[in-house]
Image: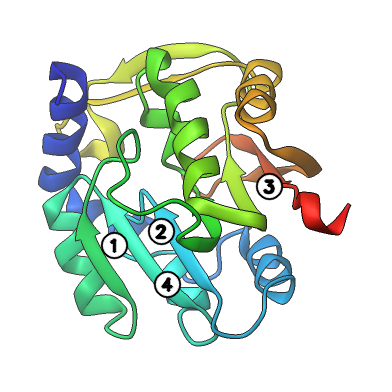
Amino acid sequence: MTDRKNAIRRAYDAIADDYLAERSAEPPVTPLLDDFADRLPAGARLLDAGCGAGTPVAERLAASLAVVGIDFSIEQVRRARENVPEARFAQGDMTHLAFADDAFDAVSALYSLIHVPMDDHRRVAREFHRVVRPGGLALLSIGSEEWEGSNPNWLDTGVEMRWSFPDPAASIDHLSDAGFEVLEQQTVEDELGGAFPVLLVRNPDPQSA
């Protein structure tokens, strides 16, 4: 794991409780999550990449979907297991997913892609496409502009957090090059500040063409 990834992992370990306290039970992205779930069959297998403490995805969708969450912060994973016992969680890295091809009906990544090192965004798109079956969906929040930076006192915790993300056009290019097609794009407010584009994309099924 690179120094940058390790720094972010350590930061999320250190602020696990503070971060969870800042995330609301009904975030602005909730309607999109509900719509996403409605597009999937009951019991569909969902990978939540960068699951954090299980909020908002697993907490909202585990009652109707088979949610598997991964996060590279072990403290986030521990809290996710406590908060959403009906889902499964493991420590993992979305740039190298430890799952078979076509293992999932859908993938979600909310508030997590924005921490992926710039050079790894294309790899993540390919990994998501690899593990989502043909006809499957992904719900992804991306950066609103190209930016790399940090906050030395994020959430007033005294802990530095880092971000890096391409602009929306580049993110969409990465997903398209990986084999996804964009179905919808909406901008959603984040309760921690700012707003992010959220993409609904599909892995086309050649059998249904």
The residue at 21%/31% (across/down) is: 8
Amino acid on which disc 2 is placed = Arg
User: Do callouts 4 and 3 mark residues in contact (Cβ within 8 Å)?
Assistant: no
Question: Residue shown at 61%/23% (left/top)?
Answer: 171
Q: Residue under label 2, please give it.
A: 23
Which numbered marker is on residue 203? 3
Image x and y of residue 12, in percent? 20, 43
* Residue closer to the observer: 31 or 126: 126
Residue nearest the viewer, comparing 182 with 101: 101
Mark 4 highlights which residue? Answer: 67
Q: Secondary structure at mark 2?
A: loop
Residue type (three-letter) at the residue carrying disc 1: Ala
Amino acid on which disc 3 is placed: Asn
- In the rendered view, tell whether residue 167 sits above or below residue 72: above
Q: Is residue 81 placed above or below 63 in the rendered structure?
A: above
Asked whether disc 2 touches disc 1, contact meaning CB atoms under 8 Å apart, the reply is yes
Residue mark closest to the camera, 2 vs 3 = 3
Tell me where residue 128 appears, x and y as whole percent. 49, 43
Task: List the residue tagged with mark 1.
Answer: 53
